[in-house]
Structure formats: structure tokens, C-alpha cells
Amino acid sequence: MIKGLYISKAGMCARARHLDVIANNLANINTTGYKKDKLFYLRMREAQDALNDSASNELAKVEIMTDYSSGELKNTGNPLDLAIVGEGFFVVQTPQGDVYTRDGNFTLDAEGRLTTLDGYPVLGNGGEIQIVGNEIRIGEDGSITVDGEIVDKIRVVTFDDLTQLIKIGGNYFSDEQTNGAIEVSPEKIHIRQGYLENSNVNGIQEIVQMIELYRQFELGEKAIKTQDQTLEKLINDGGRVA
Amino acid sequence: MDKALQIAASGMQAQKLTIDVIANNLANVNTTGYKKSRLEFQDLLYETIKSAGTSTGGENENPTALQLGNGTKVVSTQRSFRQGTVIATENPLDLAIEGDGFFIVRMPDGTSAYTRDGALKISADGTIVTSDGYIVEPEITIPEDAKQVTIRKDGQIEVTLFGDPEPTILGQIELARFINPAGLEAIGQNLYRETASSGNPFIGTPGLDGLGLIHQGYLETSNVDVVSEMVHMIEAQRAYELNSKTIKTTEDLYRIVSQLKR
């Protein structure tokens, strides 16, 4: 009887967490290069551990996976806006090590380096990219031409298992848990200059999931109330002989 | 759902700022040489509930991390320097740049500012100035006895004086261009200042080295496209509504929780 309460509780907590994930997707519906998170509920058998240990802090048995499908490209006309078509990430150098992003909204810093909007250098095959000149062209293969002279090539990397990438905010991903970045072979690199990749969040899908979880949450409530009433009857009327 | 309220609030705040930027674009739809801007967002820091590789009991490990986001934040406004439509005005001191480049303006403090607004005027002493009276570099003075001012596509200024059939060359309008115009700082009055991220100005003759050509008797209108601004406004409004649904749902879930205990 008590176990049933915990099962219902686990289900409701999982739905509450799902709402947090949907909230974050919707908040980032216009964030360049954002990849939506998807929440999966674990089956009861896999959730058994948590149920056996009812004192556990683990409130919900869920998995969150990031969906790396591409977002739509939008034309901006800005020569330092880049979008990757297909697989791959830009490499960005931070004081904490290299991080990765699909957000190609770049600018120049005081030293003429190509950087992200928060000032971290974007890496090319030769390290930091210095751009000094008047006209910049970035080819489909990522080659950077400044005033007719090729200066470097944008580095594009990928990972053998994208599920191991960790989001760290600022549109960046960390490779801490992965087996390391793998260079994307040159013929597979497709970069569009003057474009940015939209967030891949679909508002309708998220709202439908929100409705689903709301109804499931209500079912959990009904289940708990029913068990509560049954318990009440057992405790208050159980010993009474008619 | 503990986070959902704050997350949705960050999303609504972001969309509200988008509307502000669109409002400014629309307000400047008829401003000569105005360049539209847009907002850029980033996701906020993630909270790691459990990290990948930790034990789930026995030999088993979590294959993936469990991370929860905290919403969105605004990082910057980005300006688009696309060409605006060029319209005829018949005024000899209305200049439009077709292509890259900015007119160079000397501010009262001696520094340079840059503009695409070519509605120029002649000051009391004959100097070519902007509508706000700032001197256009390099400084050119039109003589009092000038009958006609001709500005060629390459920026050369010629005047025809009374009693002289041959035109006199007065000087040359120069243009400046930047490798990253999106990095320029807007200071109002259609003026921009160079910053570290715009790079140093490259100053040259119109029509050469990638600089645009000058058209006398024309003005460049703003590059705000009313239809796409309206579409962006609808997008922002719907995104705002979606985030408000999150708040409504969170509230409903809390209500259900509070009714659990009879």
C-alpha cells in the first residue's frame, strides 16, 4: 500500500522535472544554435532502485538527452555570422579549455581575432584566427580569405558519441565526458557565411508534451488520493466489527 | 517545476526585449540611413543533477548526465548593415552610398564618427556639414559665388562659379569602411563610432578598394523591412505566450500538489 504511494510520487516528480525541461526549451526558442533537451521516463523495473530506497534524494527516474538535429538557417547578411550545415561544432578557446558551439555569431576583438560575442577566440586549423584587412570571405569549406589571401580555415569537429557532450550555458558544450573531439573530414564541412542556425525547438511539440505531462500529473494525484482514502478506511474502520 | 517559473520568466523577459528592439526598428522605418538591429540570445548555466559515469548501484553506471537548464539571456544587439533602398530627392547635397562605406564626420570633440546618412547641408561659412552641423571630413568649403555643385560618383566635388564656364575641382569626399561593421557602436543621430570589434577604419576613394559609389541627389532610406519586422513581432509574441503557458502549467501543478492532502 505504502509502496503504491511512492510509485505515484515518483511519477509525479518525474512530470514536474519534465516541466523544467520544457520551460528551458521554450525559453530558448529564439537562441541561436540552441539544441533542445528531451526527457525520457524510465520504466518501472529500472526505477525499482529508487523505490526500494525511498529515503533517496533521487526524486524522479528520468533521462535527459539533447536532440542535435539541425535548426533552420536564417540569413543575416553579416559577414561574421557563420552556420554549419550538417554535422560539426565550432571550437572556442576559453580559460577552462576548449569548448564547442553551433552558434556562429562571431565578432572581432581589439587584436583582430575572430571571437564569440563573449570574447573567446574561435579556433582555426592554425589556432586563433587573426583577421586584419578590409574584406573577409569564408568559403563553404571554412577557408577564410582576407583581402584575397587565404589566412586560415575554420576548425570543425565532432564526437563519436554526442550523448556524452555536456551543456555549460552560453550556447557552449563541454567535452569533459567524451573521448575527445574528432576533426570533421574537409569534404564534409559545409559552412554558410552570412547565416545563423536557429534553435531547433518546436513550440507546438513542447506545448503538446506540456499538456500530456499535466494530465499525467493529475492522474498521479487521483492515484494518491484513492490510496489515501483506502488507507484511511483501513486505519479507522479496519478493526471495527459491524 | 521548481525551476520552471524562473526559466519561463527569463524567456518572457527575452521576448519582451525583442519587441523593444522591433519597436525601435519600426520607429526608424523612415530614418535616412538607419540600420536595423536584432537581439542575440544564449542559454544560461546548467545545473547538473547527476553526472555521467556515476554508479547507479552494482556494476551499472549512468550512461548520460542529467542536466537541467536555467533559461535564456540576452548577449547583444547585432546591427545589419545591408543596403537600404535609394530614393531620388533632387537635392544636390543629398548623397547616397551604394555599396560599402560610411561618410566620415568630425565630432565637436575632434574625434571621428561615421554615418550612412548623406542628407548634407552647407553651413553659414560654406562648409559641408551633416544635418546636425557636424563637419564632414575632409572639410570642404563651397565658395559664395558658386552656381552649381556637382558631386561625382567617385566623390569628387566640382563647382561652377558665376562667370566661369569651366568647373573648378574643390576636393574629394572620402568614405570609411570596417571589416566588421556589426561591431560599430551606435551613438544616436544616425552616427556610429569605431570600437575594438569593428576594427580600424579603412579610408579611401569611393568606388575603389571595395568602397561603394556616391549618388548625388539621392538618399538611402532605412533598411527596415516592415513585413519581416511584423513577422518577427508575431514570432516574439507567440514565444512570449508559449513561455506564459509554462507559468500557467506550473501554477496548475502546484495547485494539484496543494490539494493532495485533504
Image: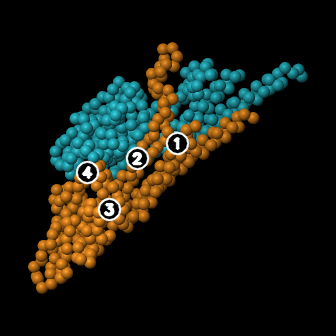
* Sequence-first disc among 1 and 3: 1
Q: Which residue lies most toward the bottom here?
A: B163
Residue that numbered label 2 is attached to: B75
Chain letter tied to orange: B
* Sequence-first disc among 2 and 1: 1
Q: Is residue B170 left or right of residue A118?
A: left
Tell me whether marks 2 and 1 sit on the same chain.
Answer: yes
Residue A60 locus on image (x, y percent): 57, 28
Which residue type carries mark 4? Answer: Gly
Q: Secondary structure at mark 3?
A: strand
Tell me whether marks 3 and 4 sit on the same chain.
Answer: yes
Residue that numbered label 4 is attached to: B199
Tell me whether marks 1 and 4 sit on the same chain.
Answer: yes
The number of numbered discs placed on residues in the rendered structure image is 4
Tell me whether marks 1 and 3 sit on the same chain.
Answer: yes
* Sequence-first disc among 3 and 4: 3
